[in-house]
Image (tube, rainbow, N blue to C red):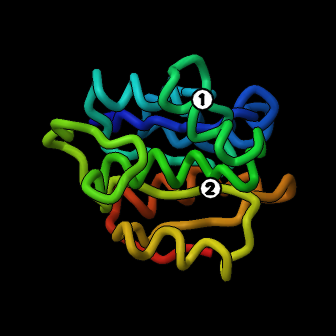
Amino acid sequence: MNRHRVLWIEDAANGDLSYMFGPVFADGSCDLSIAMSATEGWRQILSSEFACVVVDVRLPPGDDERWIDVYNESGHNKVRAKLGVVLAKSLLRPEEASVPVNPVPAWISPARFGFLSVEPDHEMDPLIRPLGVVVYRKKSRDDKQALLSVIKQVLNGHGPSH
């Protein structure tokens, strides 16, 4: 079986692993890498190719000054900073981004991105649609299939997911 490389950028991944990783592991189709900040996600994306990138909206900046600056401009507030969206915009719309990537890795496309976060649908749609990303799922503790569902929808080219 061909396993897909998947990057999950989620600061609470350690806590979420206990209930969200089980279905991904049992499915057996993915090699899951985890980044727990905008900096870690940025570095992994720039150094490796992934079939799917699942992003949380509320990320801490990590140790890169560019991400720290964006975070500081938000008043040190993950909800306002929306670093996951800023990260996706940096890759998918670098000409409009506060932290542009140059050059953008050749494998990057909106079809490889999905969001998994706690924001309601009506808040996410205007943030991700301009980026060309159509896969989003609201995260909840009761939804153990959420991560696997986002991964599958991205890999299969299906969206939107809510």
Amino acid type, callout 1: Ile
* Label annotation for residue 132: none
Residue shown at the point (46%, 45%) measured from the top left = 87
Q: Secondary structure at mark 2?
A: strand
Front-most of residues 141 and 47: 47
Number of other residues with Cα within 10 Å of mark 2, as a class: few under 14, some 14 to 19, many 20 or more: many
Front-most of residues 13 and 82: 82
Residue shown at the point (48%, 69%) measured from the top left = 128
| Above/below status of 106 relative to 32 | below
Amino acid type, callout 2: Leu
Which callout, 1 or 2, points to the residue nearer the camera? 1
Q: Position of residue 137 (x, y in %)?
A: 63, 66
Q: Tell me where residue 100 sits by quadrant.
A: top left
> Which one is earlier in the sequence, the residue at label 1 or at label 2?
1
| Above/below status of 32 relative to 93 | above
Report which residue position mark 1 lands on: 68
Q: Position of residue 43 (x, y in %)?
A: 40, 23
**Separation (CA) of disc 1 from disc 2:** 22 Å
Q: Position of residue 52 (x, y in %)?
A: 38, 46
Quarter of the picture containing the N terminus is top left
* Label annotation for residue 116: 2
